[in-house]
Image (cartoon, rainbow, N blue to C red):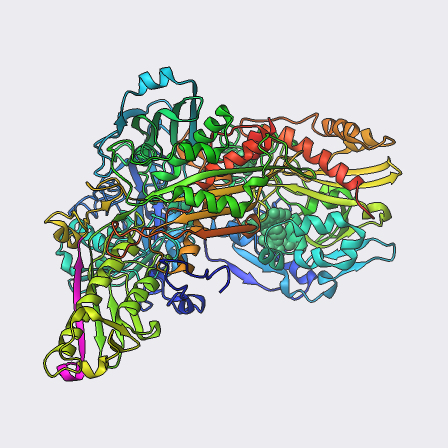
Amino acid sequence: MDAAAPKPKENMGEPLPRIDGRLKVTGQAHYPADLPTANIAYGALATSSIAKGKVTKLRLDDARAVPGLLDIVTYGDMDKLEKPKFGNSGATSIGPLHDRRIFHDGQIVALAVAETFEAAEEAAQLIRAEYEEEKPTATFDSPGTATIPAAGRSPLFKEDVKAGDFDAAYAAAAVKIDQRYSTPTQHHNPIELFSTTAYWQGEQLVVHEPSQNVTGWKVELARQLKIDPAKVRIVSPFIGGAFGSKGPMTPRTAIVAIAAKRLGRPVRCVTSRMQAFGTQTYRAETRHRIRIGAGKDGRITAFAHEGWEVTSRPDPYVVGGTSATGRMYDYGSVLTHVSLVQADRNTPGYMRSPPETPYVYALENAMDEMAVALGMDPIEFRRINEPKTEPIGKKPFSSRSLIQCYDQAAAAFGWAKRDPEVGAMRDGDWLVGMGCATAIYPTAVAPCAARVRLTVDGDVRLQCGSHEIGTGVRTVAGQMASERLGVSIDRISVEMGDSSLPPAPVSGGSISTASVCSAVLKACDAIRTKLYAAATAEGGPLAGSRNAEFELVDGKIMAKSGASAKVEDVLKAMQVGAIEEYAEFAPKGATPEALKKLYAGKPEFHGGDQDEDSVKYAFGAEFVEVHINRYTREIRVPRIVGAFAAGRIMNTRTARSQLMGGMIWGIGQALHEATEIDRRYARYVNRDLQDYLVPVNADIKDLQVILVPEVDHAVNPAGVKGLGELGNVGTAAAVASAVYHATGKRIRDLPIRIEQLLV
Amino acid sequence: MRPFVYEQPADVSTAVAIASRFTTNDDQPTRANAQFIAGGTNLADYMKLGVADPNRLLDLNKLKEQELRHIHVTNEGGIRFGALARMGEAADHAEVKRRYPVIADSLRLAASGQIRNMASLAGNVLQRTRCEYFRETSWACNKRVPGSGCAAMEGFNRQHAILGASDACIATYHGDFAQALIALDAVVHAEGSRGARKIVFAKLHRQPGDTPHIETDLAADEIITAIEVPAIPWARRSLYLKIRDRESYAFALASAAVALDLDGETVREARIALGGVATVPWRAGAAEQSLQGKKLDEASAEATAEAAFAQAQPRRHNAFKMELGKRTLVRALLETRDMKV
Ligand SMILES: Cc1cc2nc3c(=O)[nH]c(=O)nc-3n(C[C@H](O)[C@H](O)[C@H](O)COP(=O)(O)OP(=O)(O)OC[C@H]3O[C@@H](n4cnc5c(N)ncnc54)[C@H](O)[C@@H]3O)c2cc1C
Ligand code: SF4
């Protein structure tokens, strides 16, 4: 065991290496843009250079003259089709080629298709649009924004949560703060670029595209193309980074499908890094006002969180993190309100822990300020306000190990050695600061189907239309089957990422491990039941024993009594070559429509704040040390420790990897990441990885992940809380807290940059 | 990216001959039909982005003259860098590290390991700005399309220059190596159709003025063959300090190349160049003079920094570079003073 493969503690699975790891590191894993290879024509997008107005004319002559050009798909060519829809499967309702209006910078105006990638690119660059330009609105504070309430605009954000009488409690509070915070636009920038490859086999359309939602896309693409969903197949076996960006389908997919149909050959379009900023979704910039009131004893009596979020004109994308922040501590009274601010921008979308990252950042930075105002240790302040039930609906938490996380992380970090006085700690010319913050992420689960086959030779084939976005879900699903069927992991093949497989929900909201494993568990248990029934039937090898007394181990059915029978022999006795089970899992509280909706690509989410019996969240505590040069003020993070509790940990290796990646991203969110907007033109400026900074290896030094044991049977049959989006939630606030401790400067606007510390 | 002709000339004179056949005396090297390519880490990138558009590339990597690849100590005790030597080789060269730590640092702290293994030293000093508005062809940019305007001037200009800018262009020169070279009075050897010549490094780059598309003093058919740094024994007390948004793989927000000749704590001679803040490699002459004969302490370092930035013109998002540039220089001076040599 090493740091990458932590020794399992209570309720944790083995750190099995990823079953597809070898394929990935040897280049044998085929990503969507790798296949197919024969007879490909290449597409390149031409995009708008204005953010608002109308395309009056498109000059195509120069592009058409490029040798090797095959086709240009543009206005008019999509008219007989349906416009895209905004929702879980669709990134935006803007149908760029359905409408000559320009809603945002970088909007698709045409797709050039050619024999080679280079010719397609050249032709796309030569397409010249003429515009009737209007003055666009860029973001907050730009003239022309419209502000509307967010509640009710999204099925995931029904209301502004409230409890008690905030105004009275805040007015009466002995100690209070009233502060504003902000987070910038961020783009996912997965290393794997966005691509679509489409081809038709007669009436059947096949699309290879990195996707976190193959079932949803199948249905939505069929709707746009006005064909039967059964005629559409989305293939996405490996995904090179998604983070939410590959959750909703963008308008490009249908455009490439039409190009392939017109040409009668496969068309592949890989968008450039720069184009991705305008053609994909992003994390909306947010602003917050937070008021906290408390007694001198540190008990919070009043909490208000107001949020403002930028969205596009046509689509009300809601971030809405007040549901989590409003339930975080024992506040007494709660007041929240979220507003959308419409501007001439592309539609934002999900990005790793979409609501929590910005909203919990603001809350936790405010909590740190409040601890300072109270003269109290920030951990102690949180301990005092640890709730027994959540303050909004007064429901219990299904489990909540926040304080255990704080205790374990604080011990590992050496919090006791921190001198609480601001600016007191030094390392030569470097100011040293230490800070901490809470991480929270709702534990949701959705219906999911899976097919599992156990053969007489002892091989297992597991099929599920979920998605390996790098989280290790293929491995943990295999691990679940391995445990339940007593088959070693190398006899298990796992197929995912194809809409022709049993449907799984979108790989978002950290639901995949819970949903997929619950379905796999159900399929495996059905196989077990059949095996036991056959084994214990009259004349069977274990005749007379009862089902419940068996385990499957190493290809054998083992009875408690010590009697055993080989699975192989049981199957032979049944005169079958394999047992195959198709299982449909629906979470507790699922509606009668739940499974139908799964097949329709519109899965119901349960858990989080949605259930009647309890609220369900995973928690963590993150500790950061920063060093800031006393002259030049650059900020470095030599040390970060996070402790997290998330129910059953299926695999300590993949769990740690997810949390580590999250924490590193959190450092990026604190110090590096921001998409810059030219306010005059509402256009993105730093549209590549040269200027859109993320941490590099040299930025990450000593990083420690602690997995805190936790058992929670209420969340789902697998007992799993999602943790893919937990790790990056507290980090930025912990960094802000450490920066304050080092310098006495409270930075409220992310990212925290050198210029904020020079003044 | 457009189709182009790719050639691998066999020697310098052939390369020059081909270049002069496809260019005219008035052509700027970065706008000519035929352009040289070495590591390609800058030019190939800009061709893909549609920023550079040569229809003929002359690849210098097959030139047979071996001295183009060598780094050696000269008879006078300086160092001569062949133009095609790679950044990584120069950064790791024992004599470079020993004699001119400022040079080794400037290269070691630049780009990434992979890029340093590809990129040539001549290509490095000639690298073009990374201005976002220059790199994306739909923006107005006087450097890319003369007379089209400058979108950066009133736009998002956090990375832009506060020294040496004009009303036409405020793009930063982002290279690091050049700051060490200009501080050490390096000389560039070039060969073109009008013969071989030496160019004082400080004369190689041109400030933007009204003609930001004219970036250097080179003719379109001139090849840099070598860069020579004179013997400066006291340059063993020298360093390059680079301040950036992250720990590695980022351009400087501000940097300082400093070499000091000290008599105890008193400065006999100082060499100072500033990176990340100016439109060209920037020698801070007035600042050097203000330090001469003075005891180097925090106060005199601060006075030197004031002198270095006296002419600076901040804009909306880059105003912090005034303060950061000064502090970078102060820190660099004090750290150089404290070096054990
Ligand atoms: C992501 C990234 C990060 C970077 N970070 C840094 C950094 O931190 N610091 C830094 O200093 N640099 C940095 N760079 C720039 C990098 O150092 C340059 O791209 C590189 O040094 C250019 O060298 P090259 O040989 O590849 O030049 P090329 O791309 O081959 O050529 C560049 C230019 O020089 C001309 N040229 C090349 N050789 C000659 C010659 N012998 N005679 C005449 N003309 C010639 C070419 O015609 C072209 O105009 C970075 C680059 C990238 C892509
Ligand atoms: S600063 Fe210079 S390079 Fe940048 S847009 Fe303006 S003219 Fe172009």
Is A702 magenta? The answer is: no
Q: How many marks?
A: 0
The answer to whether any part of residue B127 appears in the image is no
As rendered, which of A732 and A198 lies closer to the eye? A732
As rendered, which of A594 and B183 lies closer to the eye? A594
As rendered, which of A758 and A733 lies closer to the eye? A733
Magenta residues, start to end: A571-586
Q: Is B23 located above or below residue A452 in the figure?
A: above
Q: Quadrant of residue B331?
A: top right
Q: Is A326 located above or below residue A74 in the figure?
A: above
Q: Is B221 located above or below residue A427 in the figure?
A: below
Quarter, ligand 2: top right
Q: Quadrant of residue B68?
A: bottom right
The answer to whether any part of residue A316 appears in the image is yes
> At which x and y percent is residue A264?
23, 62
> At which x and y percent is residue A18?
39, 65
> At which x and y percent is residue A272?
40, 50
> At which x and y percent is residue A190?
41, 51
**Side (left or right) of A533 relative to B259:** left
Q: Is A466 located above or below residue A75 in the figure?
A: below
Is A585 magenta? The answer is: yes
Q: Residue furthest right?
A: B263
Residue that appears at 16% across and 59% down: A584
Residue that appears at 51% across and 30% down: A747
Q: Quadrant of residue A119?
A: bottom left
